[in-house]
Image: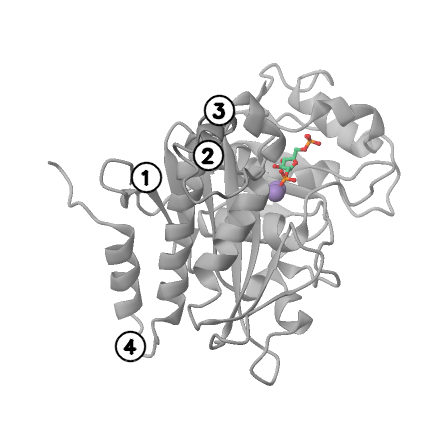
Amino acid sequence: MERSVVTIERHILEAERQFPEATGALSNILYDLALAAKLITREVRRAGLVDIIGKTGAVNVHGDQVKKLDEYADEVIFRALDHCGHLCVMASEESEGLLHIPGEFRTGNYCLLYDPLDGSSNIDANISVGTIFSIHRKVSAGPAGTLEDCLQPGSRQVAAGYVLYGSSTMLVYTTGNGVHGFTLDPSIGEFILSHPWMRIPSPGQRIFSANEGNFVNWSSRQQNLLNHLKGLDGVSQNPFSARYVGSMVADVHRTLLYGGLFMYPGEKQNPKGKLRLLYEASPMAMLIEQAGGRATDGERPILDVQPTDLHEKTPLFLGSLEYMDLVDRFLPPSDESLEAVPMSAS
Ligand code: AHG
Ligand code: MN
Ligand code: MN
């Protein structure tokens, strides 16, 4: 063995020791999220089989109805965290309103926002999906959490992360002290530190990741950016490669490891695009910035955006610093002309 074997529990504990004033609450929330990730992994790995084995009763021993995976993941996360005593409220992509802590359990000083199953349209095709989470400190008065606790800008996140259910399951998180990745060893059921201190490569690989099928609905600035990346504006002889899974967790994970540019811009009918600020864009922005990259909505840092609605959407651009500079050059503040921006080589 060349390196110590560090479990996620040990890693979180060691990190906590550096802050003598830490209560352990945040660590406990992260453990419980890791537990939820294992339960979701088990179910994701059986996708496609549940209809078959579930009906025989061989697997579905509890007599539960076979659930859609996103509903299952939503419930698992809520139930893994509702009784931990450290959360005052939760919010999920799957529920319109706030998810209050049941009356029989204690409440705490943190608020959890999550996307239980990201990329759910990919699940039937056996393509990677994920979970995204964002944690804020409680700011409202009184024991119960309120909307005010959830509607905080990303810069106030105390932790953020995602789980990627890919060829292996990985949990990647930050508490503001670097980005650390853990791979689940299914034989022992432990997340083992496999990617300490993750940094987005700079210069990163020349990869762009966007749903180009929306090209016709993009602004001319956005179209110009794409044309530049593809070498169609004649400026660069070295076009980017295209990679787009359609599961944000997978696309962002690749961007974190290889570098490049991930984008989900606004569209004519949907000026704010598709991705949700609180439980998709903000946590990914915290991770990417902690890893040395940048994330914006095309005009300002995602982490500076003050949310006004639990499920609000935002355009999103994130990636390696040098490619984010290109985004700034092609998408300057909206009052400028929509004509092509003259480019120097890049
Ligand atoms: P979700 O499955 O949580 O609704 O999120 C899907 C998101 C995201 O994962 C991905 O980046 C994007 O939708 C893909 O959208 P398009 O199909 O429009 O490209
Ligand atoms: Mn999603
Ligand atoms: Mn989802």
Residue underneath mark 4: 20
| Extreme residue toward the left, this view | 1
Q: Is disc 3 in contact with disc 4, using a CB cutoff of under 8 Å?
A: no
Q: Is disc 1 in contact with disc 2, using a CB cutoff of under 8 Å?
A: no
**Residue at figure coordinates x 58%, y 20% from the top left:** 240
Marked residue nearer the N-terminal end (3 or 4): 4
Q: Element type at marker 4?
A: loop
Tell me: 195 left or right of 43. left
State the image quarter where residue 26 is shown: bottom left
Label 3, label 4: how many angstroms apart (C-alpha)?
51 Å
Name the residue type under label 1: Thr
**Residue at figure coordinates x 87%, y 47% from the top left:** 335
Marked residue nearer the N-terminal end (1 or 3): 3
- Few, some or many residues within 10 Å of mark 3 (<14, 14–19, 20+): few
| Extreme residue toward the bottom, this view | 142
Label annotation for residue 183: 1
Q: Is disc 1 in contact with disc 4, using a CB cutoff of under 8 Å?
A: no
Measured as percent of width and height from the top left, residue 278 is found at 63, 55
| Residue depth check, mark 3 versus mark 4: number of the one nearer the observer | 3
Marked residue nearer the N-terminal end (3 or 2): 2
Label 1, label 2: how many angstroms apart (C-alpha)?
16 Å
Mark 1 beta carbon near ligand 1 (under 8 Å) = no
- Coloring scheme used: one colour
Tell me: 166 left or right of 232. left
Residue underneath mark 2: 44
